[in-house]
Image (spheres, grey):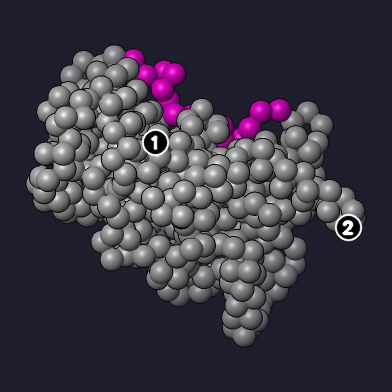
């Protein structure tokens, strides 16, 4: 056992503990009060990002609920290092934003392509001008609605003409400063909200921010509940007649996969849908390194989501390399004994919540045996290499479906990406069952 393998579980258990997050929040609030600073929310808006357009629609309602000052910034798209499959990311973002909009009663329909460059440029100038006049929240959704309109001949709304024009140099300076600030604060995406040391992505994570502000007493009189509460759809999932099978694409190194596995299996049990295990190698083992800032945000975000979903998480022992290969080699073995889901859950919990070293025989044996499997068959199963072809085939199918990341779900011709999209999986099950 290496020193890193020995120390990582202890370090991460403290680092990603709920108590640590709450202590950081308390310290941030103490510093804010000491400085006399009001509640301030930085928002980083990417003009041609549909998720940013959804946030823009939610901002007026959000600002009406809380005593908070908005500091908006227009930013560039994420760098290539954080978006290894940019074309797929862009196309899927539009599809997913349309799902979100319909789910939450917002306005976005996928036009099937990105806005033209000249329209993006005009929208950028308009919103930078709105920021200069202190009217970003009033104009952002209006500009986005025009930008994403199906009819590209539609002229900008009259209200936009009332804004003071800004020069191209002013726009460039604003974006450069905004990009620098976003990087300094520790992120890379658009549609991001930053409040006192913590990041919140789009309307999907707005509920975390609302809960924090309500705990601080920052809500206005008469404000109750949340704008977009977390909902897996599990509570309302019922048995279905002939539901489609669910292809569950996951990686043993994906923390989001780790916290959704038990829930997708539960959804399958509740509805009667078969869940197929479609494992893939993690990006880093396919030659696609993930930037440090992205890795860190993902794990912190996973810890928050795991707490809300009631899933154990935080005592980590990174399974990259040999531990993952050993785990994947045993999935076919577990499936032969009708214990595929049990083994996946045991492995995920072991490396992401208990700090088990799956690269050691001692650690792997614990994972195997509590899944209901006998260790005697493991040494032979570990020698089999057929899992590599299966992982490669799964990756190719994922790419063919227009996705590249995990966890993802495929039901017939419909694909869904993300641990926070089980409500969309449930909806697809209902519409496709006969």
Can you see residue 81? yes
At which x and y percent is residue 18?
A: 62, 38
Question: Which numbered circle lies on residue 350?
Answer: 1
Question: Which numbered circle lies on residue 433?
Answer: none
Magenta stretch: give its range: 224-238
**Main secondary structure along the magenta-highlighted residues:** loop
Tell me where residue 218 sits by quadrant.
top right
Residue at point 20%, 25% (across, down): 374
Question: Taking 53 as reference, is 132 left or right?
Answer: right
At which x and y percent is residue 255?
A: 42, 44
Q: Nearer the viewer, residue 166 or 416?
A: 416
Q: Nearer the viewer, residue 137 or 384?
A: 384
Which callout, 1 or 2, points at the residue further toward the start of the chain? 2
The outermost residue toward the bottom is 169
Q: Which residue is mark 2?
A: 35
Whether residue 233 appears in magenta in the rendering, the answer is: yes
Q: Residues within 10 Å of mark 1 (few under 14, many from 20)?
A: many
Question: Taking 207 as reference, is 295 left or right?
Answer: left
Tell me where residue 371 sits by quadrant.
top left
Q: Nearer the viewer, residue 1 or 11?
A: 1
Can you see residue 65? no
Asked if 270 appears above or below 177 in the picture, the reply is above
Task: Please tell me whether mark 1 sits on a helix, a strand or a loop.
Answer: helix
Whether residue 223 appears in magenta in the rendering, the answer is: no
Residue at point 65%, 55% (across, down): 194
In which quadrant of the rendered image does the C terminus lie?
top left
């Amino acid at each position: 056992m290496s020193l890193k393998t020995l120390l990582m579980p202890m370090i991460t258990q403290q680092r990603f503990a709920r108590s640590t997050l709450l202590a950081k929040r308390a310290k941030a609030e103490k510093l804010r009060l000491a400085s006399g600073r009001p509640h301030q929310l930085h928002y980083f808006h990417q003009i041609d990002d549909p998720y940013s357009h959804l946030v823009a629609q939610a901002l007026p309602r959000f600002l009406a609920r809380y005593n908070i000052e908005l500091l908006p910034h227009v930013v560039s798209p994420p760098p290539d290092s954080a978006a290894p499959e940019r074309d797929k990311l862009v196309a899927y973002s539009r599809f997913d934003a349309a799902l979100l909009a319909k789910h939450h009663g917002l306005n976005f329909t996928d036009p099937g392509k990105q806005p033209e460059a000249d329209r993006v440029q005009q929208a950028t100038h308009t919103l930078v001008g709105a920021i200069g006049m202190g009217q970003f929240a009033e104009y952002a959704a209006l500009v986005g609605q025009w930008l994403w309109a199906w009819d590209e001949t539609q002229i900008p709304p009259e209200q936009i003409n009332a804004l003071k024009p800004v020069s191209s140099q002013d726009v460039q300076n604003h974006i450069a400063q905004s990009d620098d600030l976003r990087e300094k604060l520790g992120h890379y995406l658009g549609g991001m909200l930053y409040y006192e040391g913590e990041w919140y992505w789009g309307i999907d994570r707005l509920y975390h921010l609302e809960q924090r502000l309500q705990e601080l007493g920052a809500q206005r009189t008469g404000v109750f509940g949340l704008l977009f509460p977390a909902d897996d759809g599990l509570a309302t999932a019922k048995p279905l007649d002939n539901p489609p099978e669910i292809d569950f694409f996951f990686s043993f190194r994906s923390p989001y996969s780790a916290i959704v596995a038990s829930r997708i299996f539960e959804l399958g049990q509740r509805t009667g849908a078969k869940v197929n295990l479609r494992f893939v190698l993690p990006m880093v083992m396919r030659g696609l390194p993930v930037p440090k800032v992205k890795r860190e945000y993902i794990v912190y975000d996973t810890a928050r989501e795991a707490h809300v979903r009631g899933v154990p998480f935080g005592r980590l022992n990174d399974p990259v390399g040999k531990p993952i290969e050993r785990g994947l080699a045993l999935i076919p073995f577990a499936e032969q004994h009708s214990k595929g889901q049990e083994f996946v859950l045991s492995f995920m919990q072991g490396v992401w919540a208990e700090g088990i070293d799956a690269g050691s025989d001692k650690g792997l044996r614990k994972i195997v045996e509590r899944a209901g499997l006998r260790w005697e068959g493991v040494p032979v199963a570990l020698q089999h290499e057929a899992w590599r072809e299966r992982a490669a085939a799964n990756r190719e199918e994922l790419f063919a479906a227009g996705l590249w990341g995990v966890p993802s779900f495929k039901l017939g011709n419909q694909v869904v990406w993300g641990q926070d999209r089980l409500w969309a999986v449930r909806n697809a099950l209902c519409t496709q069952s006969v």
